[in-house]
Amino acid sequence: MDEETLDPEDWATLAELSHRIIDDAIAYLREVDERPAWQEMPDDVRDFFAEPLPVSGMGADGVYDAVIRNVMRYPMGNVHPRFWAWYMGAGNYTGALGDFLAAVQGSNLGGGNHAAAYLELQVIDWCRQMTGMPEDSSGLLVSGGSMANFTALAVARNVHAGVDVRELGVAAIPRPLRFYASNQVHSCHRKALEALGHGNSALRQVSADSELRMDIEELTDAIREDRAAGFQPACIIASAGTVNTGAIDDLEALADLAAAEGLWLHVDGCIGALLAIAPRNRWRVAGIERAHSIALDPHKWLHAPFDVGCVLVRDARAHRETFAVTPEYLEKTPRGIASANWLHEMGLQTSRGFRALKVWMALKEHGVEKFGRLIDQNIDQAAYLGELVAREGCLETVAPATINILCFRYRRDGMDDATMKSVNTEIMLRLQEEGTAVLSDTTVRGVHCLRVAINNHRTRRSDLKLLVEEVVGLGDSLSERYPRYG
């Protein structure tokens, strides 16, 4: 009986197809601004994704043609220069090559004595250097901010539980733990505390001040009240860039308070931690180096292709003791492939992809200084957008850009809130459907608004000028539905 393999019978034909794919990929990014920012899939494309399990193969050429027709034409759009929804990096071609090479090499980053594992440790150390954490800190590359924050909160919980929570479980914790954050904190923290077994009630959210930062005075009172009520304050979760508006909590003041109260300070820096490398804006995250743990996302302002997040922990021993399990089949050996440290001991996953290469290659190609300048550039662009909005009488800033996120809305005198929400939602959807730009919407202090998060190295000021022109034009057109407001 013939033995089979997934390798091709004809490597030359595969090489020809591979060259075609590379050429197409370069053209795809070179011409990205000529395509819609987003477009709806037609019914026949949706039907394609309902096809049954293939029994026999169609060959690599046929597979690639299907991908071109049905996948590449209908992306989420975050590589487009006018994609400003939510908060996503725009990727980079060298990083994409890194993902390809990582897949070709095929290493499992559970750990071990091989190049990919050492390269991940180097990337983690670079992230440590960028944020100013001490040399003996530990870290791990993960899927993104949600898992980075979860990992850090798990370590904080174990340090402050007062018992061996790994062995005894959360029910053995003598006093219920409390974690503190502003009411602008990302929802992943609620999910983390629920998954850790504490429930959403363990997350005490305090008010935001006039600049949408955590209210330090209210936080101080909350800690005191909880202690008096029999709770165990454990961790302050600071936001270095909130998801709604980009507001940055006072990290120095929170570090002082955490030290005075004996609490863990975790900084959710998935939006703004990398401001630390921006020449003109690093002052905004002063104090981040004092954190006990930091979550950050190289797939945002380092523009690594999705996905890659990073968690950094000041106490490497506490980090390892939170997750390490050493079965007989993963014991360290004096020589050979198992003679190095196991990365899986710092997190939940044993099987781990080679995420580090795409970050490493882009940093080596461009240097950290260029990434810092690009961060400054995005912040300048958000300020410019704010100026354009201020010039239009029918546009209103709801939350000014602290860093690179601006919240604004279309309005006319006499429009009630329900009408303005309806008009602005329709503006957002039409911009998407027409392929002009992709925005998101949110609510800030009870006011519905459009949200523009400029986290894109391809964005130009001309794109922002076009956005304002289109918003005004669409808004004026939609306002005709409400003649008493026109």
Image (cartoon, helix red, strand yellow):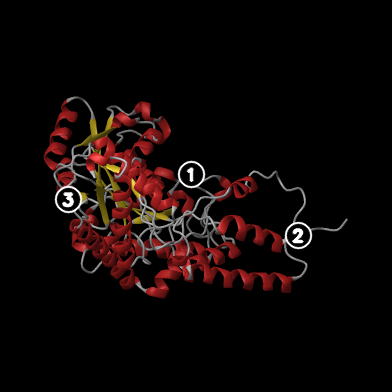
Res 371 seen here: yes
Mark 2 element type:
loop
* Residue with the most extreme right position: 1
Q: Nearer the viewer, mark 1 or mark 2?
A: 2
What's the amino acid at mark 1? Val
Q: Are marks 1 and 2 in contact (CB under 8 Å)?
A: no
Question: Badge 2, how many Cα within 10 Å: few under 14, some, many 20+?
Answer: few
Q: Amino acid at mark 3?
A: Asp
Q: Position of residue 189 (x, y in %)?
A: 34, 40
Instruction: Pick out the residue farthest to the left.
Output: 217
Could you tell me which residue is drawn at 70 percent across and 69 percent down? 14
Q: Secondary structure at mark 1?
A: loop
Q: 59 left or right of 421?
A: right
Do the residues under discs 3 and 2 have CB atoms within 8 angstroms?
Answer: no
Asked if one can make out residue 119 in the rendered structure from this viewpoint, the answer is no
Q: Residues within 10 Å of mark 1 (few under 14, many from 20)?
A: few
In the image, is 210 to the left or to the right of 305? left
Measured Cα–Cα span from mark 1 to mark 2: 35 Å
Total numbered labels: 3
State the separation of the CA atoms marked 3 and 2: 58 Å
Q: Which residue is mark 2?
A: 5
How far from the left and from the top, in percent, is residue 326?
Answer: 51, 46
**N-term mark: 1 or 3:** 3
Q: Is 113 left, or right, of 64 in this rendering?
A: left
Which image quadrant for residue 482? top left
Residue linked to disc 3: 250
User: Which of the two discs, 1 and 2, labels the residue nearer the N terminus?
Assistant: 2
